[in-house]
Image (tube, rainbow, N blue to C red):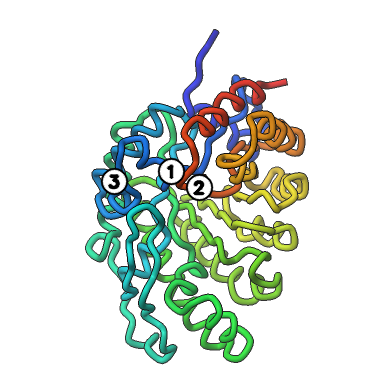
Amino acid sequence: METYTGKQRVSAAFKKTFTDKDPAIDRVPAYPFMGQCNPQLIGASIREFLLDPKVFVKAQVAAYERYKPDILLMQWDLLMDVEALGNELKFPEDSMCISIKLALEEKGKLGSLQLADPTKDGRLPGYLEALVETRDIVTETAVSPVIAGPWTIAIGLRDANKLLRDAMKDPDYVHELMRFCTQQAIRFGDALVDLKIGPNYSEAPASCSLISPRIYRKLIFPYHKEIVDHFKEKKVGVGLHICGFTDPILEDMVNTGVTNISVDAPTDLAKAAAAARGKAVLIGNVDTNLFFYGAKEDMRQAMKNCLDAAPRDSGYILASGCEVPGVAPPEKIDWFMELANELGGSN
């Protein structure tokens, strides 16, 4: 029986979406979004994982060797940009970093902010180095970055509550901030492209669980499209992940022109498949709670529901809806890949 690599499975998903070809493959590609759950595999803390690129690489390689995902997501944290732009971060021993001082606590400071250089500032260079090192080690699976989108950067600099108030009372300021953050997001993306790696942007706070569809369309969509258009000129595809509930903006997400969209468990996968079909690869949306709570049969049913909702010829990639919790037992991630092999075979 022929064996396939992760890269071959992912390539087949993209071909099914964007061409008339229907290459034979053994199963639907699958991967969990792994980041802060990986340091436990090498006896490291989350703090060490986030502050030392060598520990990051070691944990990611250990995750690949144990789980064999079809995509190895290089999930560090989404505060790299804001830290390089002036936020002060706190790194707890066994949880994700948080901002304890914001660069834009006073909105008037925007004019004095300077764009960060991904090759020089903060932890950005370490992330790029870790990507390259991991890609050199892990050759059969796609090693894929995830970086902050402009809305995530804006909220990181300003604070969610303040930025949402700004959106209502001073939308011109929000547009000014979003232009700045879009330039930063493009800069980081360009640094990835220089390494021959396409960018994937995470925009967790762009979810309709937090904002209205109107805010997305007025204050975020134009900047997402600007980013995609920038990379289209370079013939580089772009991925977009938005956590939470995104049903009202699924078509908007696809209309940005991204090559793939990733959706979380609260989103209706059948609706997402209808919006994305023939236009973008669809990724998601197994509930991440199942990687901590729940039995194996619960995970099996959730994964089967996803596979049933997304047509096999749609280029669907089976994945967790968001990042697996840092406290997830490794055996539950084992379950996910075991079940992907069991359930994901071609009809």
- Confirm or deny contact between disc 3 and disc 2 (CB under 8 A): no
Which residue is under mark 2? 325
Q: Nearer the viewer, mark 3 or mark 1?
A: 1
Q: Is residue 340 left or right of residue 143?
A: right
Q: Crowdedness of circle 2 by 10 Å Cα count: few (<14), some, many (20+)?
A: some
Disc with the residue nearer the chain's start (3 vs 2) = 3
So how many labels did they put on this image?
3
CA separation in Å, label 3 and label 1: 17 Å
Residue 285 location, quadrant: top right
Q: Callout 3: helix, strand or loop?
A: helix
Determine whether 274 is above or below 183 in the image: above
List the single residue furthest toward the top: 1
**Residue 96 located left or right of residue 253:** left
If the image is split into quadrants, where does the N terminus sit? Answer: top right
Q: Assess whether mark 1 and mark 3 are in contact (beta carbons under 8 angstroms).
A: no
Quarter location, residue 20: top right
Instruction: For marks 3 and 2, give the one nearer the viewer.
Output: 2
The x, y position of residue 49, in whole percent, is 31, 48
The amino acid type, in three-letter code, at marker 1 is Cys
Cβ atoms under marks 2 and 1 closer than 8 Å: yes
Which residue does the numbered mark 3 point to in the structure image?
A: 130
Q: What percent of the width, then of the height, locates residue 177?
A: 47, 80
- Closest to the observer, 1 or 323: 323
Residues under labels 3 and 2: Cα distance?
22 Å
**Amino acid carrying mark 2 in the image:** Pro
User: 47 or 342: which is nearer to us?
Assistant: 47
In the structure shown, which secondary structural element does the residue marked by tag 2 occupy?
A: loop
Please give the name of the residue rendered at 74% of the width and 62% of the height, measured from the top-left corner: 248
According to the picture, the residue beneath numbered tag 1 turns out to be 37
